[in-house]
Image (cartoon, rainbow, N blue to C red):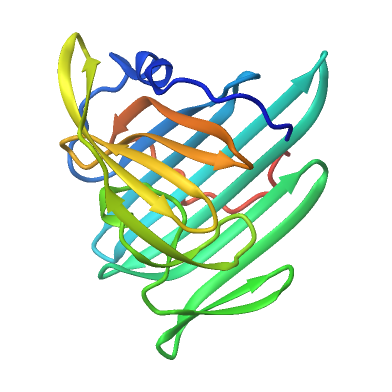
Amino acid sequence: MPRFISCLIGLTFSALAGHASPAVAGDKLLEYVIKHPAFGDIGTYSNLIETTAEGTVVTSRLDVTVKLVGLVAHREQSLRRERWQDGQLVAFSSTTEKNGQRSEMRGEARDGKFIVHTPSGIVVAPANVRPSNPWSAEMLQSGPLLSTRDGSLLSARVSLGAEEIILRGGRPEPLRRFDVDSDKREHVWVDSQNVPVAFRVLEQGTPIDFVLIRQEASPTRQTAEAPRAVGR
């Protein structure tokens, strides 16, 4: 994806204000619009978080299309699933189609490690590894990080940045900013309910913003569906 100039975070939060509704504890859906400083809205990203007596399942969906002069320059779709028990990742799967090429990953906790099968080979990660997916403030911890893009193992350092105020529903609301340094720099803004309301990823110096536009409590369950090829 081409490199372009940075956009203002104020634009991100102006899109956020007034769109998200309060959520209750339990199952919830978080849906984000993806914003590029030159191409505008380029797609959506969502986390469906389902909690049962057996643990938590997080299903993530990514759908991105970038066009130049009416032609598709970049197309990417992915479906990922994380399964957690007692605060530990026990299973992970991912199917991605990027510009017509399909790739898959899967991982599982085994013998005190987390074993990941990637297109490039097997990655052996520590048992406390977590995917690079900020679906909750609890995920924002320093330590080993599993790239959801290619399965590589990263070392993440997380620090708490300055508190920032936005207008949400016509009222000022403080947000905590977390700064994440791994293979790239990321910023995550979290509200008082520990919900990530926005996050920014720097791709080759270009800021890509994910802004929460829908927050739904107890949505219709989707993880019971059999995995299917992305884009079909």
Q: Which residue is rendered at x = 23% and y = 14% of the image?
A: 167
For this orientation, the residue located farthest to the bottom is 111
Comparing 220 with 124, the one in front is 124
| Residue at screen point 42% across, 62% down | 156
- Picture layout, residue 232 above or below residue 223: above
Q: Position of residue 65 (x, y in %)?
A: 70, 28
Could you tell me if residue 189 is visible in this image?
yes
Q: Where is residue 79 in the image (x, y as percent from the top left)?
A: 58, 48
Q: Is residue 197 left or right of residue 75?
A: left
Residue 25 spot, x, y in % from top left: 18, 43
**Closer to the camera in the image, 195 or 22:** 195
Count how many numbered circles sit on residues in the image.
0
117 versus 59 height, above or below: below
Report x, y in % for residue 169: 21, 12
Q: Is residue 99 left or right of residue 42?
A: right
Image-quadrant location for residue 85: bottom left
Quadrant of the rendered structure where residue 221 is? top left
Work out which quarter of the rendered image holds the N terminus and state it.
top right
- Which quadrant does the C terminus fall into? top right
Q: Is residue 221 visible?
A: no
Q: Residue at x 63, y 46 (%)?
A: 78
Residue under the point 15% across and 36% down: 192
| Near-viewer residue (109 or 227) | 109
Image position of 114 with respect to 57: above or below: below
